[in-house]
Amino acid sequence: MSSPSSATTLAPAPIRPAVGVDAHALFALSAPFIRSGALRRRSVADYRTAAADFLVSPGPAGLLGCVALGGLPDGAAVLYNFCVHGARQGTGLGSALLDALLHRADGRPLYTATTGSARLFHHYGFTEIPARLAPPGWAAGLDPARNSRVYLRT
């Protein structure tokens, strides 16, 4: 009998709201993605200030994944800083985090930007839109050098 793959034997990771003391772990989880250009640079202090925006999946040696939901002045929301530890990619953790975030978004229009493939966003009903159609205050903060594509889920 063959042994199951590690992805199928991993127990589902819990997801909870982040708190200020998670700031260092959020920074550590995000650092490789920041270095690669996939995430915007943030400091530990930035993560501490925005902790209430985050949902996290804790693991025995740090965070396994995170995603944040920020509000926009027009009542819409923005999904940001979405990342899953490399060892947990492909295990469904990203989908679980996104499900929890969509529940938290409570049906509001939801914007995001990514430099990645956006396969998961497409699966969840996000559609690519021109950045000029996104809320101006948020879109102005996008770094053109990163070549992010903007998505909307209504």
Image (cartoon, helix red, strand yellow):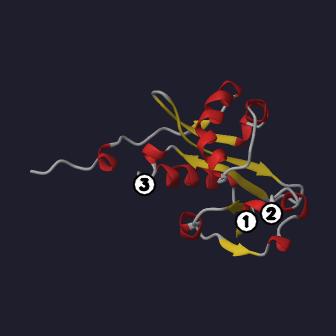
Instruction: Name the residue tied to disc 1.
Output: 147
Quarter of the rendering occupied by the C terminus: bottom right
Position in image of residue 128 (x %, y %): 69, 74
Q: Is residue 62 above or below residue 149?
A: above
Instruction: Residue type at mark 3: give it.
Output: Gly
Residue 90: mark in rendering: 3
Position in image of residue 68 (x %, y %): 68, 46
Residues at marks 3 and 2, CA–CA distance in whole angstroms? 29 Å
Q: Do residues under tags 2 and 1 come within 8 Å of each other at their CB atoms?
A: yes
> Which is in the foreground here, disc 3 or disc 2?
2
Nearer to me, 5 or 42: 42
Outermost residue toward the top? Answer: 21
Instruction: Residue type at mark 2: give it.
Output: Pro
Is tag 3's residue or tag 2's residue first in the polypeptide sequence?
Answer: 3
Position in image of residue 77 (x %, y %): 77, 56
Instruction: Residue type at mark 1: give it.
Output: Asn
Q: Residue at x 51, y 43 (%)?
A: 85
Whether residue 60 sits left or right of residue 76 in the image: it is left
Residues at marks 3 and 1, CA–CA distance in whole angstroms? 24 Å
Secondary structure beneath dot 1 equals loop
Position in image of residue 63 (x %, y %): 54, 34
